[in-house]
Amino acid sequence: MPRPKNKKELTELSQSNFKKLNEYVDSFSEEEREAEFPKGTMNRNIRDVLAHLHHWHLMMLEWYHTGMRGEMPDMPAKGYTWKTVPELNREIWEKYSNVDLAGVRKMLKASFSELQEVIEKHTDEELFEKKRYKWTGSTSLGSYLISATSSHYDWALKLIKKCKKVQAF
């Protein structure tokens, strides 16, 4: 499906991609789900990828709540710029390194639901009108939500598939 242009498409694609990702993860044995990816990726296993998604959900929710209060959120996060996202992602990786896959999946499902609630409470115009909110700059709220949901789930699915393809089982 092409990039969403309205609330219905955003809802459908975010839910569909999230479901595809989870079904793919569920298709592996427990041993395969826990296995390390080949060297060369920062996210070393499925847990790391899902923890990354969860944390970006949390950041999106923080931007949203801060922005909707009329304040400017720290984006991507306090102390980071868009140019230093690799360092931020490394910090995210470290933060969740001691959380097991089941715990990460539970957190991811909860943060996914929170983002779905955000999408649900807005109209097409509120989601897709550019420059509607000061905190989104020249883009739209929907663009941020696409990046934090459907596009990010697609990235995660492709990464896991790529790593599993070269993984020896």
Image (tube, grey):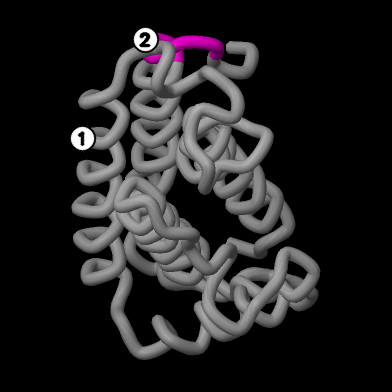
Residue 72 falls inside the magenta stretch: no
Give the camera-side residue of 112 and 100: 112
Mark 1 or mark 2: which comes first in sequence? 2
Q: Mark 2 = which residue?
A: 8
Mark number, residue 103: none
Give the camera-side residue of 158 and 120: 120
Hey, what amino acid is under mark 2?
Lys
Q: Position of residue 33 (x, y in %)?
A: 41, 63
Q: Main secondary structure of the magenta part?
A: helix
> Where does the C terminus fall, quadrant-wise?
bottom right
Q: Position of residue 109 (x, y in %)?
A: 24, 50
Is any part of residue 71 visible from this angle?
Answer: yes
> Where does the N terminus fall, quadrant-wise?
top right
Q: Mark 1 = which residue?
A: 117
Give the camera-side residue of 154 and 91: 91
Mark 1 Cα shell of 10 Å, populated few (<14), some (14-19), many (≥20) = few
Residue interval drawn in magenta: 5-9
Give the camera-side residue of 23 and 92: 92
Q: Secondary structure at mark 2?
A: helix
Q: Secondary structure at mark 1?
A: helix
Is any part of residue 32 visible from this angle?
Answer: no
Residue at image point 63% right, 70% down:
37
Q: Position of residue 41 (x, y in %)?
A: 72, 71
Residue at image point 39% right, 14% down:
7
Hey, what amino acid is under mark 1?
Glu
Residue at image point 26% right, 53% down:
111
Looking at the image, residue 3 lies above or below residue 62:
above
